[in-house]
Image: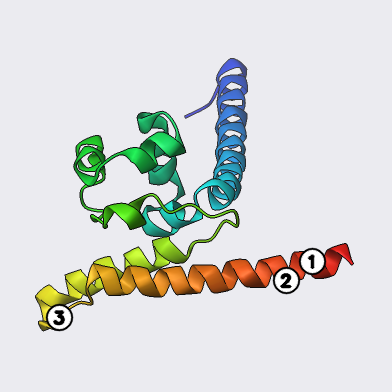
Amino acid sequence: MDISAIDLINIESFSSHVVSLSECRQSLHTYLRSKMSQVAPSLSALIGEAVGARLIAHAGSLINLAKCPASTVQIIGAEKALKQMQYRLKNYFSEVPTSVFGEKLREQVEERLSFYETGEIPRKNLDVMKEAMVQAEEAAAEITRKLEKQEK
């Protein structure tokens, strides 16, 4: 079938729009990944950048999200991704962004899923969070030492 000149112009225009939108989407994804790794690295490690950003947006802010009890977060829609923590651990913030808590929570989710397949008992939440706190403190100390070296 022959394509008329006007049809070809419209197809080319549409194609260039699709390519432009694809490039814009990729650029926004890169930006979101960068911002989430700075703002909420643990949340990003646990549930991913896009879901984490949506969760923060739905809660209104990262601080509002951190203040939410687990049941509220479950209602927001993250029931499968987030697990309850003790209150004193739930609101952990550090001056140095770290993904340690998110990584540990992800490990814990994977251990719990593995329990259904293998029957191997997962570690307790308290033990995992204690381990995460030690690693987070070590990471913060290391970054602080590097910053002090740079200032000298």
Up/down of 16 relative to 98, above or below: above
Up/down of 67 relative to 113, above or below: above
| Callout 2 secondary element | helix
* Front position among marks 3 and 2: 2
Identified at 62% across, 33% down, the residue is: 20
Q: Are marks 2 and 1 in contact (CB under 8 Å)?
A: yes
* Front position among marks 1 and 3: 1
Identified at 51% across, 68% down, the residue is: 136
Outermost residue toward the front in this view: 88
Horizontal arrangement in the rendering, residue 124 relative to residue 149 (left or right): left
Mark sitting on residue 145: 2
| Callout 3 secondary element | loop
Identified at 55% across, 46% down, the residue is: 39
Real-space Cα separation, disc 1 to disc 3, in angstroms: 43 Å
Outermost residue toward the right in this view: 152
x and y percentages locating residue 142 in the rendered image: 65, 73
Q: Amino acid at mark 1?
A: Glu
Real-space Cα separation, disc 3 to disc 2, in angstroms: 38 Å
Q: Are marks 3 and 2 in contact (CB under 8 Å)?
A: no
Q: Which residue is mark 1?
A: 148
The answer to which of 21 and 126 lies nearer the viewer is 126
x and y percentages locating residue 144 in the rendered image: 69, 66
Q: Are marks 1 and 3 in contact (CB under 8 Å)?
A: no
The answer to which of 97 and 58 lies nearer the viewer is 97
Mark sitting on residue 121: 3
Real-space Cα separation, disc 2 to disc 1, in angstroms: 5 Å
Horizontal arrangement in the rendering, residue 131 relative to residue 10 (left or right): left
Q: Amino acid at mark 3?
A: Ile
Mark 3 / mark 2, whichever is N-terminal: 3
